Amino acid sequence: MALKRQGADVRALTVWALLGVRDWNSLLLRQDGFYEPGAFDIRSTPPRPTALAAATAALASGRRFHHPVLDTPGWWRRPGRHYVTPAGGVPDTVRAAPRC
């Protein structure tokens, strides 16, 4: 939404893993059958909408979306996300992502 306000020609929104994924927690290196829901959780009939479905609907219709988890840093911004410390170390602070 911020990019659109700045003049970017945004015409679509893509939801990765609409119905979830299997084994992406191992980057498909193993076949454990580990299921992670996407916008819909297919473990129920009919598929259950998740918070991602609500976020997608809000953003696609130009509304703001808020959920308490958005107040915490994503896993990719947490200091403990690395198996091995990167060369040069990890910065003490990480710039917050822009809010939608």
Image (cartoon, helix red, strand yellow):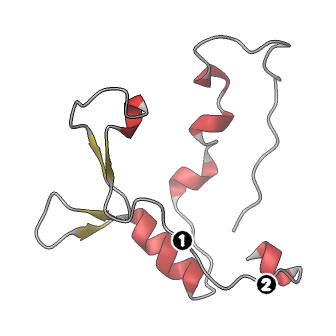
In the image, residue 24 sits, relative to residue 78, either above or below, namely: below
Q: Is residue 29 left or right of residue 14?
A: left
Q: For the residue carrying disc 2, how many other residues have a C-alpha within 10 Å: few (<14), some (14-19), or many (20+)?
A: few
Secondary structure state at the residue bearing disc 2: loop
Please state which of residues 27 and 42 is positioned toward the viewer in this rendering.
Answer: 27
Q: Which residue is mark 2?
A: 9
Q: Residue at x 61, y 81 (%)?
A: 12
Q: Which mark is residue 14?
A: 1
Please state which of residues 29 and 84 is positioned toward the viewer in this rendering.
Answer: 29
Viewport quadrant of the C terminus: bottom right
Q: Residue at x 81, y 23 (%)?
A: 92
Please state which of residues 65 and 86 is positioned toward the viewer in this rendering.
Answer: 86
Q: For the residue carrying disc 1, how many other residues have a C-alpha within 10 Å: few (<14), some (14-19), or many (20+)?
A: few
Q: Residue at x 57, y 72 (%)?
A: 65
Q: Is residue 50 left or right of residue 72?
A: left
Contact between marks 1 and 2 (CB within 8 A): the answer is no
Classify residue 11 by image quadrant: bottom right
Residue type at mark 1 is Thr
Viewport quadrant of the N terminus: bottom right
Q: Marks 1 and 2, how far apart in space?
A: 15 Å
Residue type at mark 2 is Asp
Please state which of residues 91 and 19 is positioned toward the viewer in this rendering.
Answer: 19
Q: Residue at x 59, y 54 (%)?
A: 70
**Residue 30: x, y in percent?**
30, 26
**Residue 53: x, y in percent?**
41, 71
